[in-house]
Image (cartoon, rainbow, N blue to C red):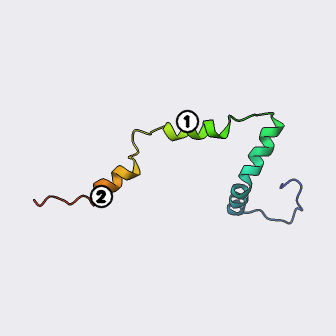
Amino acid sequence: MTEQADDDLVFPPERWAATFRSHAQLILHELGEYLSYSPPPLLERLNEDAQKIHQQRPVLQETLATAIQPRAKA
């Protein structure tokens, strides 16, 4: 973009980050088509990702249950 833009235009990094983020899906789609990339079916990806449990990250329901339990008086 900077090579195609006028020399007097300014592209602040923060604005680039926001612009890229808002168009990331389209950019990745175009790149995937250009590289002839075929992602796995969506339902397969959702199923696999839902089954991955990170050992260091507690499940939200467990965290909530622990947080609302009455504390024993010392």
Please rate how many residues cluster around mark 1, counting C-alpha atoms within 10 Å: few if below 14, some from 14 to 19, many from 20. few
Q: Which mark is residue 48?
A: 1
Q: Residue at x 84, y 65 (%)?
A: 9
Local packing at callout 2 (Cα closer than 10 Å; few below 14, some 14-19, many 20+) is: few
Is 28 in front, or is 65?
65
* Residue 71: percent from left, percent from top: 19, 59
Which of the 4 quarters of the picture holds residue 6? bottom right
First along the sequence among labels 1 and 2: 1
As drawn, 12 above or below 3: below
Q: Is residue 36 above or below residue 61?
A: above
Quarter that holds the C terminus: bottom left
Residue closest to the eye, 34 or 64: 64
Residue kind at label 1, given as amino acid type: Glu
Q: Is residue 1 left or right of residue 57?
A: right
Image spot of residue 47 (x, y percent) = 56, 38
Residue located beneath label 2 in the image: 67
Residue at x-position 72% and y-position 55%: 20
Name the residue type under label 2.
Ala
Real-space Cα distance between discs 1 and 2?
Answer: 29 Å
Q: Nearer the viewer, mark 1 or mark 2?
A: 1
Q: Secondary structure at mark 1?
A: helix
- SS at mark 2? helix
Quadrant in which residue 22 is drawn: bottom right
Specify whether 19 is left or right of 69.
right
Q: Quadrant of residue 4?
A: bottom right
Residue ID at (72%, 50%)? 25
18 left or right, relative to 60: right
- As drawn, the label of residue 58 is none
In this rendered view, identify the residue nearer to me: 61 or 8. Answer: 61
